[in-house]
Every structure is written in structure tokens, then in C-alpha cells.
Image (cartoon, rainbow, N blue to C red):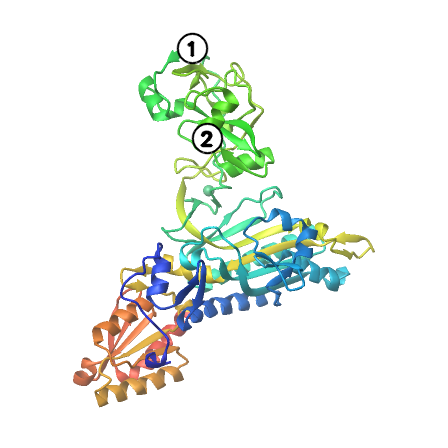
Amino acid sequence: MRYSQLLLPTLKETPAEAEVVSHKLLLRAGFIRKITSGVYSYLPLGLAAVRKVERIVREEMNNAGAQEVLLPMVQPADLWIESGRWEKYGPELLRFKDRHQRESCLGPTHEEVITDLVRREVHSYRGLPLNLYQIQTKFRDEIRPRFGLMRGREFIMKDGYSFDASEAEAGKTYETMHYAYHRIFSRCGLKFRAVEADTGTIGGSFSHEFMVLADTGEDTLVICRKCTYAANMEKATAMEPAAPSEEVALLPLAKKETPGKRKVEAVTEFLGITPRELVKTMVYLADGKPVAVLVRGDHEVQPVKLKNLLGAIDVELADDKQVFDATGVPTGYLGPVGLTIPVVADREVARMRNFVVGANEKNFHCLNANLGRDFEVERVADLRMVTAEDRCPLCGAELELTRGIEVGHIFKLGTNYSEALNARFLDNEGQERPFIMGCYGIGVSRTVAAAIEQNHDKDGIIFPLPIAPFQVVLLNLSPNDEAITAAAEGLYTALAKEGIEVLLDDRDERPGSKFKDADLIGIPYRVTVGKSFAQEGLVEIRKRATGETVSLPLAQVAAELGARIRAELA
Ligand SMILES: [Zn+2]
């Protein structure tokens, strides 16, 4: 491809709308343009990167035995009513009526459509296992779309759905998909981790998120420094606390004036103790009902764990007024002793002795409170966020907290959708059973954005070779010089013959802006034909990621690059 003929509108300035680095660079590099909030057009280079990811996804899904289909983007309301999600899904589901007043929606996901397809077409265990996927545009009407391709309303996704006859078969399919996802993100050239994810009410350890590691990621990952343990913040758990020492004598409960001291720091400083010797009482509203949660002073409640413990649909932290309405105590002085709302405690609290709590009276705290002696709780469970001071639940080694971007999610659905939609098959004994399902998503456009979040510098994108729109950008620095142009054109042909995807910058531009654009668009190899070719017959190869350069005679360049690229992609 010739740059002079390519729609590649690079920008010198960063558009004000862009907040995160991938959004800034995708706009500046001329990869995408916004049409309306959260909706983008893909220009040729943006689409080329997306297609590269798609190709890897297709190859690995096909290798894993999945079959590609293409499901409709417009879906009838009937199916969503049948699954119960027409009501539950909320305003992210874009609903509308067609000219016959039939209600429809734009597909944010395709469990209903695929389950409907399979219930119509597969009636026997002989048709199983079945694993179907598609690569398609999805629409979710996010209230506040941000960050370009990271969180758009319209986006390109691979979604796959598996149908199995038994739990054991479904487990095997899950493992096959887990492996395929490892292959996919490895082949994309990304640093990533698969982490255990929360499965909500379904339970079990059958959900993993695939996270591209990046300092700018919005998710926190908990990773063991020694073993394979990795989980997201909602799911991560620490090594179980040691049992309380029997030797610590319980001291008498004592009320102590703590005038104006509401926050943990203020109370502990006033009392001359550490936050580890205090228990916070946090009030949450679980489906509107107040519940007090006890955690150690230096810990934070993890709301998803609380939600799962209570079996609630929604939990939120109560505000000061809601706390006062529920307990009659101003925020900051709340404690479990004599509290009338339900109380649950993090398991760390159950291990503590003689700790400080609020006295349920303004300006007072209690010293030497003890669970079991001074108050009871309804449940004790792991309810807190893991910290960097915690130890691995599997091996006891140190944990590391790092940041990532979710690009894939695999999930064992069980029979939720097949039961709701009455999708059944006859097993080998003639028994009717619901299909056991799994679902497997990859944010394709998001993967491109995540790759940029992970790989960039001040000059622009640094694409991993496997997903770069071109492998080589060839700069003709003097398009008006006959010898240099002849050399560049000859090399362009030779590179193409080597099977290399090459962009020839044949524009009549200053060398400086050609170098700048080459860095900005992030092509892995830059080849320059300019002054040193005119003087010494040498052509420069520069690797974008490392900046290392080598100058070679013109005739050797195509073979050298061909060898390097084949080696890197192997
Ligand atoms: Zn470990």
C-alpha cells in the first residue's frame, strides 16, 4: 500500500475529547473517528488492526473445534421476554419498535438468539457437543461511554456459546476454551493473565477473565508472586487468618470519649493505636435493607462479596442520612455492640481480640470489644478487599496487586438459559435434559485499544508485530530523487515478494514528518531509503519497540526482514 493513496489522517494535536492513551493515539494516528457518543468509524489502519485480531481469534476458535456463525444484530423482544431479561437488562439494552409496532432490541449479547437456534435445530445428544461463535458488532447503550474503543456503545466482539450433554463434557469444553484464549492472547503478542472472576449466584470456579496487563487498566488484579494464583479484586481472597490466640486475655469493655474523632485515622491517632486494632462498622443497603458490615480498620469492604453472601441483587454503601435513619447513630461512632440492624463480619474480625469500635453514641468509642462476648453477628465470611500485605490463599507467598484491562471472559452458564428458554435434548437413555451451556467473549476492538495501552511511548503506538496494520513502513525520504526513488520502489516490490505487509511512504513530505508519522502509527519495522543510500548504498532498518537500528546494503534488506518477521511470528 502506498501512503499517498491511503486514508490516513494523522493529527499533530491530541483531540480534547480523548482521556486515555489508546483513545488519544487511535485518533491521532488516524485509526478511528467518532460519529457520535461511543460510536466510531474504523479507518483503513484501524480496521487492519481489528482484522488481525479477528484472524487470530478465528484460527484458534476453529482449531478448538468451534464453528463460526453470524447471528442477527436486531433481536425480537419475545426471546428476551422468554429469558426474563427484557425487564432485567436495564437501559443498556437499546429497545425500539419497527413499523409494525413489534418490539425489538439491538443485541448487546446473544445468549437468547443462540439458545433459540440450538433448541430448534438440535434435539439429540448425537448433535453434541456443539460450540458456536461469531464475530460481530454489539451495541450497549452505556450511560457514559468513554475512552474510545475501551468503552464504546458500539463495539466488535467475538462471542461464543457451547452446548454440552453433561457437566463433565461442559467442564472439558471450558478447559478447551481456556487454552484457546491463552493461545489467542499469546499470539496477539500481549502480556496478559487469566484471573479467577466472580461468578455471582451461579457459583463455582468456572469464570475467568483474561486481562491485558497495563498500568492504565481500570481493573486491579491480584497475582501470587510464586504460584499460579491470580484473581480479580471481586474474587480475590487472602490466606485464611490464623486462629485467635487463646493466651490473649479478654479485657473489660470500656467506653471512652473520643470528641469529634470520626475517621479511622483520627480515632486511632487519638487513642494511640493502629488501625489494625480497630473494627469499622460500615452500613450497606442490600436491596434497600440496611446491614452492618464489620472489617478491620485498615481493610475495605468488597461489595460483590457482600452481595453474594447476602444473595442480594444490589448492594450500595449507605450515606450519612441513611445510616442515621437506620441506626439513630451519626456516622463515625457506629459499632456492633447493641446495634439493632443485622450485622455480618469479615473473618479477620473473628480472629481479633480487644479491639476498638464505635459506641453508638456521638463522641464515644468502646475499647476492648470482643465478638461473642460483647456482640454476635449473623454471618462471618471473607468480605474484604485483598491488600498487598496479604498472603496467597494457595501457597502463602506474597501477593502482588497490578492493573489490567479485561479483554476476554469465559463463563460456565450451566442451564440458566436452556431452562429459561426450554432448550432440551434427548440423552442416550431417551431422557429429556436441558443443554449445559458456556459462553466465551473477546472484545476484539477493545483488544486493539488494550494493546496500545500496554505498548506505546511518547511518540506513539508500538504495535506487537502480530496485530500491526502493516509489518514494515518503508520511507522514501527523497521522492524527487530518481536513484533513491528507484531503490525504494524496488525494495517495496522485493518486500512484497517476501510476503511482508509493507506501507510505502511515497509522499512528498519532509523527512521529519515521515519519521514522526511512522512512530505515531506504530509499525514494528521502519526502513529508510535516503542520504546513506545515495552516499554508501545503505538502507536503515529500525525496530520501533527498541529503537535498535542496523544499516544493510539494499539487496540484503528484504531477506533480512523476511527472516526476522517469520522468526517473530513463529
Ligand atoms: Zn501462591
**Residue 490 visible in rendering:** yes
Q: Residues within 10 Å of mark 2 (few under 14, many from 20)?
A: few
Q: Which mark is residue 254?
A: 1
Q: Is residue 190 visible?
A: no
Residue underneath mark 2:
319
- Identity of the residue furthest to the right in this view: 430
The image quarter containing residue 78 is bottom right
Relative depth, front residue between 565 and 310: 310
Tell me where residue 158 appears, x and y as whole percent: 54, 62
Residue at x-position 21% and y-position 87%: 481
Q: In the image, is residue 32 above or below residue 343?
A: below
- The residue depicted at 31 percent of the width and 69 percent of the height is 10
- The percent position of residue 456, horizontal first and vertical second, equals 32, 60
Amino acid at circle 1: Ala
User: Percent x, y for residue 74?
Assistant: 61, 63
Q: Callout 2, which amino acid?
A: Asp
Side of 356 where 139 appears, left or right: right
Q: Is residue 312 above or below residue 565?
A: above
Which residue occupies 70% across, 62% down?
A: 117
Closer to the chain start, of discs 1 and 2, is 1
For discs 1 and 2, the disc positioned in front in the rendered view: 2
Check disc 1 and report its element: helix, strand or loop: strand
